[in-house]
Amino acid sequence: MKLFRMLLRSIRDAFKSVFRNFSLSLASISCITITLIIVALSILASFNVENFTKEIEKDMTIVVFVDNGTSEKKIDELEEQIKKLSNVDSYVFKGKETVKAEMQEESDIFKAIMTEWNEENNPLKDTFQVKVKEIAKISETAKKIKSLDGVSVVRYGEGMVDQMVTAFQSIEKVAYGIVIALVVVTVFLIINTIKLTIFSRKREISIMRLVGASNFTIKTPFIIEGMVLGLIGSIIPVCLVLFGYLAFYQYFNGYLYSKLIQLIAPEPFIYMVSLMVIGIGILVGMIGSASAVRKYLKV
């Protein structure tokens, strides 16, 4: 019960300190707000880039063209060899008549041209459409399939796809790095701001120590004050996430430039990111305050 009363008193003192030292608190909140806005934008970008990469990986297909005249027995053997490759996740076999029918459905021009084709004079090839487990090994897997007897041509959009995935992965790493760097910067900003606050209340703290106040009693209000500053500083970034991302998603109809680059659906994504931003604000506020008290007051 005593601990509970002490905690309530610390919360009360923390809120009083925020308003009593309003100019310092405002400066701290402004710094936190600006930094958390950039953090929030970086988190949104990094998650979407990760989503882009996963969508590309999910849709990535190796198209294997089988030599014309290959017997059914040989095709079955080829299927078994493809199935045994470690990076193959799934595959679908399509005979040339199936490929012809699909192409006719896609275009009236194809339909007109291919109408006269029958099973004997159809120049198309039987194909396997192969999905891989790891996109990074797709080139290696394609080479192994190409070396199999009975395979004519292997295509997977080589070059362009490799460069696109590499670019997305690099952007993702940079975005995560920016988030971490900004969190560290925010901690230092809060440490310096709380340091000024502590210095202005040095006499008050000295009196508290003279009357026998424990380290816990002195530290707790400052830590809670840091939490309050972090919480208030996260309000605008959270509003930006909740309303800004929703408007952005609706304006672009859920994708950027092409349906290949799909944005993450707002719900529940924006709520998850908002909680992350609030958590980062509160956490760095606590860490900053605790560090400032320990380092500069030596209590």
Image (tube, rainbow, N blue to C red):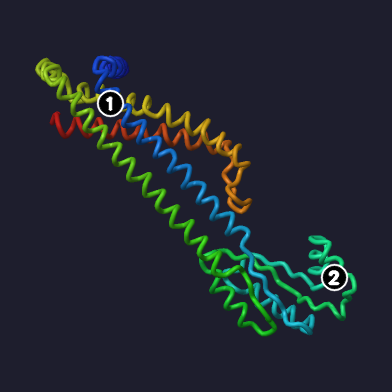
Give the quadrant of residue 161: bottom right
- Determine the secondary structure under disc 2: helix
Q: Is residue 152 above or below residue 295?
A: below
Q: Secondary structure at mark 1?
A: helix
Asked if the residues shown at circle 1 and circle 2 are in contact, with their CB atoms under 8 angstroms apart, the answer is no
Tell which of 233 and 79 is nearer to you. 233
Residue 42, given in percent of the width and then of the height, sits at 43, 43
Q: Quadrant of residue 114?
A: bottom right
Classify residue 16 as left or right of residue 243.
Answer: left
Say the numbered circle drawn on residue 113: 2
Q: What residue appears at the point 77 percent right and 83 percent down from the top-left corner?
A: 70
- In percent of width and height, residue 162 lies at 52, 66
| Figure check: 111 above or below 295 | below
Q: Nearer the viewer, residue 109 or 45?
A: 109
Residue type indicated by callout 1: Ala
Q: Nearer the viewer, mark 1 or mark 2?
A: 2
Q: Position of residue 14 (x, y in %)?
A: 28, 19
| Number of numbered tags placed on the structure image | 2
Residue sitting nearer the eye, 293 or 176: 176
Q: How far across and down, in percent of the image, does residue 168 sit?
A: 49, 56
Q: Residue at x 37, y 49 (%)?
A: 177
Q: Marks 1 and 2, how far apart in space?
A: 72 Å
Badge 2 crowding class, 10 Å Cα cut-off, few under 14, some 14 to 19, many 20 or more, is few
Q: Residues within 10 Å of mark 1 (few under 14, many from 20)?
A: some
Which one is nearer the viewer's eye here, 140 or 256?
A: 256
Rendered-image quadrant of the C terminus: top left
Q: Would you place residue 130 above or below residue 194 in this image?
A: below
